[in-house]
Image (spheres, grey):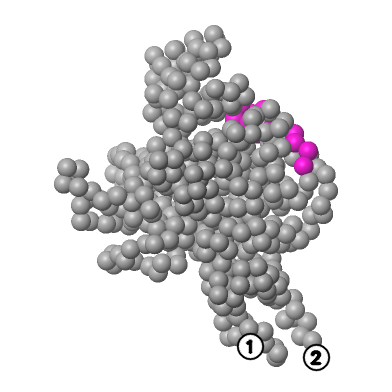
Amino acid sequence: FVDFHFLLQAYNIHVNGVLHCRVRYSQLLSLHEQIKKEYGSNVVPAFPPKKIFTLTPAEVEQRREQLEKYMQAVRQDPLLGSSEMFNSFLRKAQQETQQIPTEDVALDICLSNGQKISVNILTSDQTEDVLDAVATNLDLPEDLIGYFSLFLIRESVDGGVTFVRKLQEFELPYVSISSLQSSDFHIVLRKSYWDTAYDGDVMDNRVGLSLLYAQTVSDIERGWILVNKDQHRQLKSLQEKGSKKEFIHLGQTLKYYGYIKFDPCITDFPEKGCQVIVSAGNNELNFHVKLPNEQMKEGSFKVTRMRCWRVTSSVSGSSPEGWTEPHVKLELAFEYLMSKDRLQWVTITSQQAIMMSICLQSMVDELMVKKSGGSIKKMLRKRHNGSIYRADGQQAVKSPPLLDSPNTNREQIVKLSTKLSSMSLLGISASNSANDISGNDFHGNYAFEGIGDDDL
């Protein structure tokens, strides 16, 4: 006797509220067997056992929870979570779920100046393959590819840009953009580092200089970089002369140069329900807060004073235009060292919470490499690996993807809340915070620093 419904039972994995892939128990079991064969039984976490008889609703939920814990454990393991075996499983599952065959296609990639370039790729090409194709098309040298990344953005009717996420190693860019079925979404090439000292490496190359110049001009035009009248006049003069390097050097002195600006959202700091515009850059999250009395306040939260952070999701009934049903409410919360002995949780409710978390993570990665005496110029871009490997052989700084799994109303589909991103850096010390949560749910911060008496 075969239970047809049981065979159809599947688990949804979502990325930022969008379905990434749908997998069956048998597929996850096959992955488990492959991992066990490759890495040995001692490394691999426990997997929920097969059942001979039809599962009761309670057993279905129990299995979902067990699979969730299994996927968390695999993702959080430095060896398994960054393995090509695991990431290729997610890529293959994404392609199968969206039912897109492997074939040659042309994919449009946007540059910061609005120009589009078309790259010839396979539908099954992963993010790094597409980035390599873009670099080849632009004649960008191989040693500069690591300074740039591909980002998924959404363009509004008024020309505004929303950064959805940085494309990760576990996804296929063509499939990701096609599955959204909307012309509002685009893939854009943008620099992926934060420290402006690295601009010099990029500007030494003709193509790198042009890309950085286009991004700086674009960020100024959309108001992400603040410019006064005198500075605007100087910039215009340099632009007319074609002095790209001087233009960028002046840009570097301006407020919010190199920041990513997010859409207006809600925060509970300094009090609940405040409207806020968040920007990420210079190793901080900058807040422009509108208080209930209409007063505006600005402040910054340094990444080195965030003990940890987490991204959580919940499902609400309504869905804003352009977002998939059901609407997923995302929140980024971070525990911040306000003073020498006082930690406080600050929460941001935003559809871009995952992108904010990616920004924080990459800032920490960069700080840790710099702290250990390294440079991103010395980093080796390792194909088939989600880790950043130092050329001098020091310990890798792991940058896992961010997966989130909201509820779904689809029949015969069970929610699998994988939280594959929930811990990117391990070794979190215990917290005395009343709002503390389990270690499986948040990002510990290796770049966290205490505040000395001199700082107060």
**Total residue callouts:** 2
* Residue sitting at x 33%, y 41%: 300
Q: Which residue is depicted at the point 74% across and 57% down?
A: 95
Q: What amino acid type is highlighted by mark number 1?
A: Thr
Q: Which residue is mark 1?
A: 56
**In-front residue for pair 383/280:** 383
* The residue stretch that appears in magenta: 110-121
Q: Is residue 286 visible?
A: yes
Is residue 114 shown in magenta? yes
- Label located before the other in sequence (1 or 2): 2
Residue 245 in the image: x percent, y percent?
51, 18
Give me the residue at 69% from left, 49% from top: 126
Question: Which secondary structure, mark 2?
Answer: loop
- Residue 276 appears anywhere in the view: no
In terms of depth relative to the viewer, which is nearer, 383 or 308?
Answer: 383
Q: Which residue is mark 2?
A: 1
Gap in angstroms between the C-alphas marked 1 and 2: 16 Å
* Quadrant the N terminus occupies: bottom right
Badge 1 marks a residue whose secondary structure is: loop
Left or right: residue 299 compared with residue 331: left
